[in-house]
Image (cartoon, grey):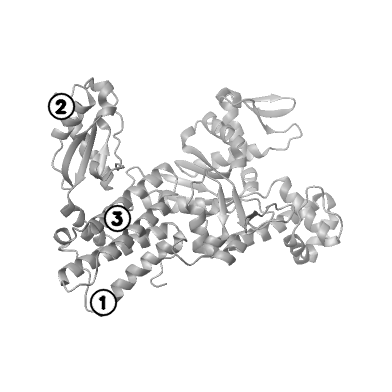
Amino acid sequence: MSLRAELIRAIADARDRAVTDGSLAIPSDVELPAIGLEKPAKPEHGDWASNVAMQLTPVARTAPMRIAQIISDHLDHHPAIAEASIAAPGFLNLRLDPRWVAGQVGPILDVEPSYGRETTTHPRSINVEFVSANPTGPLHVGNARGAFVGDVLSRVLAAAGHQVTREYYFNDFGAQVINLGLSVLARRHSTDLPEDGYHGAYVEELAAEMPDELALRAAETPDDAGILIGRWASERVRAGIEASLARLGVTFDVWKEESSLHDEGWVERAVTRLRESGHIHETDGATWFRSTDFGDDKDRVIVRSNGQPTYFASDIGYVTEKFDRGFSELIYIWGADHHGTVARVRNAAQAMGYDREAVRMLLIAWVRFVRDGAEIPMSKRSGEFITLDDVLNEVGVDAARWFFSSRAYTTGIDFDLELAKKQGNENPVYYVQYAHARASSILRIAADAGLAPDASSAGELLSHPAEQALVHHLLDFPDALAQAAERRETHEVPRYAYELATAFSAFYRDCKVLTDDVALSSARLALVDATRSVLANVLDLLGISAPDSM
């Protein structure tokens, strides 16, 4: 449990004791609000501040200042809390005991590297489907953003204690695959590309690599040539995508083909469920889902009048197949251009009897790749795009991961290539990695001098403001992880890493680690070691290396 969660529990217990002894008159049938607890903007207001009194004012029918005082009076002794005070208009402010704070260095080291993990009290089985770019060309930096978001989210959820399955949905069924096949065939025979064909050197490479046997089969069955060659070509592209993702450190537990949803009957099962629940109608020879029953602006076609299933048919089959595997939550990481699909898929899930809230779509904002201030356009069909491999070749895996992970997925990114390549403090990933390397170096130098970390006296010795600030940041890690997992949003993780590195730099500047005082040096070395451990932990969550020297 994080410190924040412990303090919230202490406040809740104080509230409940006040209700039990009649100090607070709150009806028993009232649903109490979740207790708010945040760090105040001004240090003089304490280490933590709660607005619990103002939250309870409507139900307790008492002035918030009075409620805050009552809760303060009922706070049971918690070793972390040195003082509770009241501030207008009704905040309950908590100040932590500096000796207790410093004394947490030892417990942090005792459980490394698991410190801060397993924070959830309600573990779930979660399917995270991400990337899932159509296998019609190499991954460009636009659709590759889903790889960064999905991988870090999966790492965070798993670290928090959830069971996570990483999944890639492989579209081998649609018109785009056929167009890819026809494009390869056209390049093979040096003929004009189809109207919606694909350009780029990779198409010519596929044409050159196509087996003669496959070309003969395509010539014998010209009506099926597009899908025949398209599926072969898409498998080749898929292998390249998988290799690029592996280079990035992204792997998947499941690669799921769209065709399997039809071949294995999942689409048919989904349609049957909808039909049995009364949410299907047949109009103009087509099969429709009554999405308007759930607030949609129009019903949605599942099977066209020509008997061909729509992409939406695959979506609902996929929902059924995933829940049948036993997942309690489905997370889809999609591009922002899929906005119109969200409601209809969730509507269908609800119509089939599944929990609508267990189907979550995270829509990723755009990425603009900028070089020398000019945006580079990206389009697979035109062949003008920057691939993921291009970026990794130029800036490296660590910098790419940091820059893609450090912004909320709903926020667009201008990828600053030149900044990502800089080897200095202005580059945030370099700054954080350097903090880890510096901590490792201090520990090596100390070991050579015969000194070792010892946290046994940390509570008495680590009282300097820079030491206290650094331990406070270490204590924030479990909550940073817990909140990232709870919100299904991870951009606060790199921010936490940067702030921890900044606190460590201030400590290094203000507190000499290796001194003539052996006990103080050993306590400070323990703090350095704890910082090194947490930095390595958080960098691992981001999939970024933690170098011992730089």
Residue 96 lies, in percent from the top left, at 20, 47
Residue 379 lies, in percent from the top left, at 70, 51
Residue 265 lies, in percent from the top left, at 62, 41
Labels 2 and 1: the sequence-earlier one: 2
What is the three-letter code of the residue carrying label 3?
A: Leu
**What's the mark number on residue 438?**
none
Q: Which residue is mark 3?
A: 474
Number of marks: 3
Q: How far apart are labels 3 and 2 at the CA level?
A: 36 Å
- 10 Å neighbourhood of mark 1: few (<14), some, or many (≥20)? few
Residue at 20%, 65% (x, y): give it. 523
> Position of 66 compared to 254: left or right?
left
Q: Nearer the viewer, residue 196 or 419?
A: 419
Residue at 43%, 45% (x, y): give it. 125
Q: Which residue is mark 1?
A: 447
Callout 2 secondary element: helix
In front: mark 3 or mark 2?
A: 3
Q: Which residue is mark 2?
A: 20
Residue at 26%, 54% (x, y): give it. 469
